[in-house]
Image (cartoon, rainbow, N blue to C red):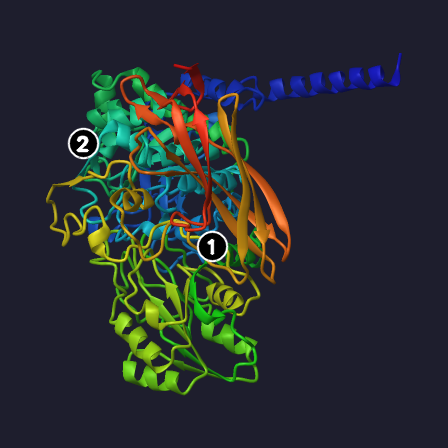
């Protein structure tokens, strides 16, 4: 007998022994056999559960005391956590411990807040245009969540930036379905690599905070499928989240968590989602309609008006108003995700000592620096020269730290709030300044210089300091958060006037923006440089200084258009603002799928800064575009050259514009590639195009249809690139299913 055959027989014997041992261990509980697929295991477990055990899994508690409703968290829940669901111990089904974690492991307010690592804002991560960076950030969040004992992470925010005044834009990934879906999908995948479940949220079209529980979004199926729903669909395909969180708003008259169209038709039937749908906290309004429409779990009681999935659901099941089969499906979906993503086989237990906070902080700093966008750099003022002698640092709490966004995603930092006096101090606050001082980081890099700070509250005093300085670094902040929107796109607290006064005194002014989204800049012609630093997270001060001094070459590109004025928006006045409690109102998405740069293209508008814009400390050239179609798939190859003197990264963007066919807008982003290139070097890249990005969605047949004709393939550095190169290619008529898989082609 050969050696190879003996080894093969030995391996088979070992496998049989292992199988026998595992069968003995799981014989009484076959659903604990990890060799079975998740669906089979879930079905076996459901079959053994009593009615009351099933009802436990579909009912979620708030993981914190709620004083205004005089409720207490379950004793088993972690203090100041987002939520808790009882498992079924006799069947080996663990409890579910939920944490808000869009940007890091968050805490409810109170004396026992967990200190965790904060990523920069979601917009910053989207501005990296780098799925690897997004994955690494997600993996960091998932690891910290597991270290704190959580196994469900309320992350994965994909709500397109239809409304740039939206207070929650900082949690999301911008205005384009492809970019947002790819970035957030990678984050979800990273989170779940830690054997925890991540959500995808908010499902769907929750694009403003004003009146979020009372507004009614009006949009057709085709437009929704080609915009917000496409972004969510791509994120689901890329990340495979275990759960989806339905949203507060109504869609065409129906609450998001009661929408059979969204939950049953789109998500579960059309997309084939096998996990569970949980409600947003306070988004449930009924028992029978919600359960039958596809909601699988009520979350965060007592945020809702009643415990709809408590005793009322039991009564509904016993009376047949909610079929027993529907309750079984609700539970099966929860268990499917728990088995699929390792929650059952790898139970969590708090192990804070296992968290490497230093390494995680480095992940956050890298993300921040990759996503900061150099918007303007006249006279090459940046990077700052270390020979400078007198530097004024003005405004933005830069002596103490960097801004964070407010609401449920707020991560509490080690060292506490660097500006505890700021208001509001209660939800959606506290206004948080992370203790990472840009001033101190700048001073550390200029040991021989005079670096003076002014808080910017007195514009005249700030201008005087600027006049006596060689260079000014002015920090401007905009606090945004959950539950409210901005009244306009201007910087608050007269900061526009401050910047104008300082720039008039010294044109060598660098403005560093820490904002939750786009802002207008009436002072733009008067300053030399502008760096959009978003909310830069843990280590944000160091991250900013590293970019300012050229230790890191900025490579972020805008994931959203910066309008020149509110008048350019589809809704110049924010619907429902100022908010009136309990008032239902409609928001008509008349722009359809023409969101962001597509709207600007369609209307011939010139933005302040276009989607995809971003400068560098070096120069790049995009060339050698070669597009073609093989087996029905469009691909584009190109070269990215570094024609400057320092190493850097460029984001090559590929757009397609139909020559004859009509789309919702003149062109669409269909691919991108972030290339790192040495000075004088070149990188070749190829992207393949998802056919859905070349098609119109047909609601009647639920297919994506590509029209026969000529299409212009455009290689550009942003959506308005005057130096873009293009090539016209011909596409044959084709039909694809809802997932973008080919059904048939036609040469008619």
Secondary element at image label 2: loop
| Residue name at image x 28 percent, y 32 percent | 224
Most extreme residue toward the top is 1
Secondary element at image label 1: loop
Q: Is residue 256 above or below residue 155?
A: above
511 or 28: which is nearer to us? 511
Task: Left or right? Give the position of 326 relative to 375.
Answer: left
In which quarter of the view is residue 664 placed?
A: top left
Horizontal and vertical percent position of residue 509: 40, 75
370 or 247: which is nearer to us? 370
Q: Is residue 90 above or below residue 121?
A: above
In which quarter of the view is residue 402 placed?
A: bottom left
Task: Left or right? Give the position of 443 relative to 100.
Answer: right
Task: Give the labeled residue for mark 2.
Answer: 252
Can see residue 86? no
Mark 1, Cα crowd under 10 Å, few <14 / some 14-19 / many 20+, is: many
Q: Earlier in the sequence, mark 2 or mark 1?
A: 2
Q: Is residue 401 above or below residue 405?
A: below
Task: Give the labeled residue for mark 1.
Answer: 556
Horizontal and vertical percent position of residue 343: 49, 34
Q: CA distance from mark 2 to mark 1?
A: 37 Å
Find residue 679 and name its label: none
In which quarter of the view is residue 700 placed?
A: top left
Horizontal and vertical percent position of residue 321: 20, 18
Task: Left or right? Give the position of 6 relative to 136.
Answer: right
């Amino acid at each position: 007998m050969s050696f190879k055959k003996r080894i093969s027989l030995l391996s088979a014997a070992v496998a049989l022994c292992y199988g026998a041992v595992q069968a003995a261990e799981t014989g009484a509980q076959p659903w604990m056999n990890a060799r079975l697929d998740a669906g089979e295991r879930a079905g076996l477990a459901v079959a053994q559960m009593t009615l009351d055990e099933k009802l436990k899994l579909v009912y979620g508690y708030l993981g914190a005391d709620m004083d205004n409703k005089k409720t207490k968290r379950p004793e088993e829940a972690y203090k100041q956590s987002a939520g808790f669901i009882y498992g079924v111990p006799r069947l080996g089904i663990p409890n579910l411990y939920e944490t808000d974690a869009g940007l890091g492991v968050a805490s409810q307010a109170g004396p026992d807040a967990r200190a965790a690592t904060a990523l920069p804002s979601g917009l910053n991560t989207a501005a990296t245009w780098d799925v690897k960076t997004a994955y690494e950030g997600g993996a960091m969040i998932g690891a910290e969540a597991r270290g704190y004992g959580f196994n469900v992470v309320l992350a994965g925010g994909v709500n397109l930036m239809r409304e740039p005044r939206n207070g929650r834009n900082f949690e999301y990934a911008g205005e384009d379905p492809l970019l947002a879906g790819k970035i957030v999908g990678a984050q979800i995948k990273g989170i779940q690599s830690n054997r925890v479940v991540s959500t995808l949220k908010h499902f769907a079209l929750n694009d403003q905070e004003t009146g979020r529980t009372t507004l009614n979004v009006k949009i057709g199926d085709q437009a929704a499928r080609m915009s917000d729903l496409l972004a969510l669909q791509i994120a689901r395909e890329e990340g495979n989240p275990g759960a989806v969180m339905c949203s507060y708003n109504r869609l065409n008259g129906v609450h998001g968590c009661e929408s059979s169209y969204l939950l049953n038709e789109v998500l579960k039937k059309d997309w084939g989602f096998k996990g569970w749908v949980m409600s947003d906290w306070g988004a449930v309004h009924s028992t029978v309609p919600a359960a039958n429409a596809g909601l699988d779990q009520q979350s965060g009681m007592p945020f809702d008006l009643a415990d709809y999935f408590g005793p009322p659901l039991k009564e509904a099941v016993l009376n047949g108003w909610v079929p027993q089969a529907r309750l079984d499906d609700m539970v099966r979906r929860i268990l499917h995700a728990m088995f699929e993503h390792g929650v059952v086989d790898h139970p969590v237990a708090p192990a804070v000592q296992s968290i490497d906070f230093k390494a995680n902080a480095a992940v956050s700093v890298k993300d921040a620096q990759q996503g900061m966008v150099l918007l303007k750099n006249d006279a090459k003022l940046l990077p700052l020269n270390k020979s400078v002698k007198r530097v004024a640092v003005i405004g933005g709490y830069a002596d103490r730290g960097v801004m964070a966004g407010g609401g449920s995603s707020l991560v509490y930092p080690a060292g506490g709030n660097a500006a505890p006096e700021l208001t509001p101090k209660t939800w959606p606050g506290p206004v948080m300044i992370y203790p990472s001082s840009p001033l101190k980081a700048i001073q550390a890099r200029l040991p021989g210089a005079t670096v003076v700070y002014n808080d910017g509250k007195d514009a005249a005093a700030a201008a005087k300091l600027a006049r006596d300085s060689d260079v000014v670094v002015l920090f401007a902040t905009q606090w945004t958060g959950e539950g409210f929107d901005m009244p306009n796109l201007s910087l608050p607290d007269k900061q526009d006037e401050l910047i104008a006064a300082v720039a008039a005194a010294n044109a060598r002014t660098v403005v560093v923006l820490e904002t939750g989204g786009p802002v207008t800049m009436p002072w733009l012609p008067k300053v030399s440089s502008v760096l959009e630093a978003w909310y830069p997270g843990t280590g944000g001060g160091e991250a900013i200084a590293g970019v300012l001094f050229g230790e890191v070459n900025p490579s972020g590109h805008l994931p959203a258009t910066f309008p020149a004025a509110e008048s350019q928006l589809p809704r110049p006045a924010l619907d429902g603002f100022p908010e009136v409690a309990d008032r239902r109102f409609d928001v008509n998405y008349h722009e359809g799928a023409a969101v962001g740069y597509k709207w600007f293209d369609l209307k011939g508008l010139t933005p302040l800064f276009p989607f995809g814009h971003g400068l560098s400390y070096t120069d790049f050239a995009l060339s050698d575009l070669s597009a073609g179609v093989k087996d029905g798939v469009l691909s584009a190859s190109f070269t990215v050259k570094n024609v400057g003197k320092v190493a850097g990264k460029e984001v090559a963007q590929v757009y397609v514009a139909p020559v004859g066919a009509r789309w919702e807008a003149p062109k669409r982003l269909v691919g991108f590639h972030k290339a790192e290139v040495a000075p004088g070097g070149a990188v070749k890249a190829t992207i393949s195009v998802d056919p859905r990005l070349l098609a119109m969605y047909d609601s009647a047949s639920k297919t994506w249809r590509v029209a026969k004709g000529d299409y212009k393939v455009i290689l550009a550095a942003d959506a308005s690139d005057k130096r873009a190169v293009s090539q016209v290619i011909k596409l044959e008529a084709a039909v694809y299913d809802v997932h973008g898989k080919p059904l048939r082609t036609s040469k008619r």
